[in-house]
Image (cartoon, helix red, strand yellow):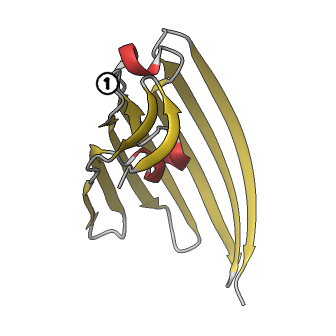
Amino acid sequence: DGHRTGQEGAAGNVDDSTLGFGLSFAGKLKFRNGDDFRFMLTGGPGIGRYLAIATSADAVVTDSGGLEAITAINGVVAYRHLWNGRLRSTVAVSGLFIDNDTALTGNGLTESVMSARANIIYEPVAKLLIGFELLQAVRNLENGLDGDHTRPQVSLKYSF
């Protein structure tokens, strides 16, 4: 609920609460050939800790010593293609956008994070999956600085 008490803030001890809530809309569209399109959009004030591994805070202390919820919006779209009975791929794009009040938070916090990924997964025999994925991501700070990240990943999964 964003309630903090006894913490030092801009105006001394903070004893306040603010409302936080989020709304989410998600779905999957299936195609006749077995492919599918997946999507999710989530957003609201005070939900930063629940999105993108807690990239954003839920609230910030105001100059008057109260709490103000920080609004964040997170979304992803993905397309999964079945090449055949043993080979599939997924391409996905995601983004997180945070509405920081930089007068209160400063300008060193994350403003947005975006990523794109593509993978290929092969099932050579039943219950054994071998996969490769490439991820490209970029993080933008409120002060205009940014950084990017590229990660290749290999996976092996045996289900028993």
Horizontal side, residue 106 vs residue 21: left or right = right
Residue at horizontal 74 percent and vertical 60 percent from the top: 155
- Along the line of sight, which residue is nearer the eye, 99 or 104? 104
Where is 156 relative to 152, above or below? below
Where is 124 relative to 141, above or below? below
Residue type of the residue flagged with mark 1: Ser
Return the x and y of residue 82 as percentages of the image width and height: 46, 64
Residue at horizontal 75 percent and vertical 53 percent from the top: 154
Q: How many marks?
A: 1
Residue at horizontal 55 percent and vertical 45 percent from the top: 118
Quarter of the image that includes the N terminus: bottom left
Q: In which quarter of the image is residue 35?
A: bottom left
Residue at horizontal 65 percent and vertical 28 percent from the top: 149
Residue sticking out furthest to the top: 144
- Along the line of sight, which residue is nearer the eye, 78 or 125? 78
Label 1 neighbour load within 10 Å: few <14, some 14-19, many 20+: few
SS class, disc 1: loop
- Along the line of sight, which residue is nearer the eye, 100 or 140? 100
Return the x and y of residue 114 as percentages of the image width and height: 46, 32
Return the x and y of residue 5 as percentages of the image width and height: 46, 47
Quarter of the image that includes the C terminus: bottom right
Per the image, the residue denoted by label 1 is 64
Horizontal side, residue 41 vs residue 146: left or right = left
Residue sticking out furthest to the bottom: 160
Horizontal side, residue 129 vs residue 33: left or right = right
Where is 67 relative to 78, above or below? above
Q: In which quarter of the image is residue 98?
A: top left
Return the x and y of residue 47 as percentages of the image width and height: 37, 49
